[in-house]
Image (cartoon, helix red, strand yellow):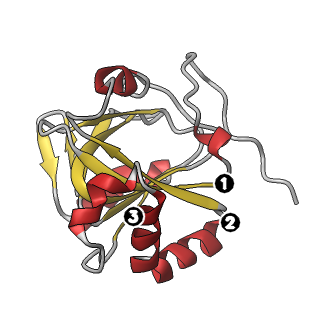
């Protein structure tokens, strides 16, 4: 994982923390060496392959879900062979937010999350295989693929409806915590 802000590239954890922590973006690295790369491309189409991936990352997935209260997961694959790839990417390459966290663990390939903090300059987070990113609910961002146009990622949800993109110019803040 690395971050680009303007013309500056950040690769050191403390540099990335300076940009990500004020926005609440969690980052991490997962050991995905137990995930068979040959199943990644097929996982988005075949539940049997998804089951193999879930089994290979069972312990860290369980810990993540328990720590945050996430309830479900799936695997997404985007590649030049994906039907209507440009239309799919067009749904997410404009600034938007979600009412739930956007949680991704990159299993193969790479992508770019553009983050639009409310009080500072935007920056791009470049993710690659093994990277975990959690973009908090209500955080303005966008997503696109890197030049190779290929990514396989684990997606983790509270509810699938919570990650639907909200595009209007939002000044809303997350609801106040209850209790």
C-beta proximity under 8 Å, tags 3 and 2: no
Q: CA distance from mark 3 to mark 2?
A: 25 Å
Label 1: few (<14), some or many (≥20) within 10 Å? some
Secondary structure type for disc 1: loop
Q: Quadrant of the N terminus?
A: bottom left
C-beta proximity under 8 Å, tags 1 and 2: yes
Q: Nearer the viewer, residue 14 or 132?
A: 132
Q: Give the quadrant of residue 6.
A: top left
Q: Quadrant of the C terminus?
A: bottom right
| Relative image position of residue 18 (x, y in whole percent) | 33, 55
Q: Nearer the viewer, residue 32 or 30?
A: 32
- Position of 104 with respect to 35 (left or right) is right
Residue that carries the numbered disc 2 in the rendered image = 69
| Relative image position of residue 98 (x, y in whole percent) | 58, 36
Residue at 66 percent of width and 54 percent of height:
158
Is residue 24 shown above or below 67?
above
| Relative image position of residue 177 (x, y in whole percent) | 78, 52
C-beta proximity under 8 Å, tags 1 and 3: no
The circle drawn on residue 49 is 3
Q: CA distance from mark 1 to mark 2?
A: 7 Å
Label 2: few (<14), some or many (≥20) within 10 Å? few
Q: Give the quadrant of residue 31.
A: bottom left
Residue at 24 percent of width and 39 percent of height:
79
- Among the two numbered marks 3 and 2 on one chain, the one whose residue lies closer to the N terminus: 3
Residue that carries the numbered disc 1 in the rendered image = 158
Residue at 27 percent of width and 53 percent of height:
41
Secondary structure type for disc 2: loop
- Among the two numbered marks 1 and 2 on one chain, the one whose residue lies closer to the N terminus: 2
Q: Nearer the viewer, residue 88 or 65?
A: 88
Q: Residue furthest bottom?
A: 59
């Amino acid at each position: 994982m690395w971050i680009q802000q303007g013309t500056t590239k950040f690769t050191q954890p403390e540099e990335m923390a300076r940009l990500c922590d004020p926005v609440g973006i969690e980052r991490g690295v997962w050991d995905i060496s137990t995930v068979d790369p040959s199943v990644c491309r097929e996982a988005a189409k075949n539940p049997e392959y998804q089951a193999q991936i879930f089994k290979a990352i069972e312990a860290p997935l369980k810990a993540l879900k328990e720590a945050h209260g996430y309830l479900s997961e799936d695997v997404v694959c985007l590649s030049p062979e994906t039907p209507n790839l440009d239309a799919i990417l067009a749904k997410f390459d404009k600034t938007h937010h979600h009412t739930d966290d956007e949680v991704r663990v990159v299993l193969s390939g790479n992508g770019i999350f553009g983050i639009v903090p409310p009080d500072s300059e935007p920056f791009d987070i470049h993710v690659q295989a093994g990277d975990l990113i959690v973009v908090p609910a209500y955080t303005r961002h966008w997503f696109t693929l890197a030049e190779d146009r290929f990514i396989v990622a684990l997606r983790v949800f509270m509810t699938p409806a919570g990650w639907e993109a909200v595009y209007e110019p939002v000044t809303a803040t997350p609801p106040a915590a209850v209790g």
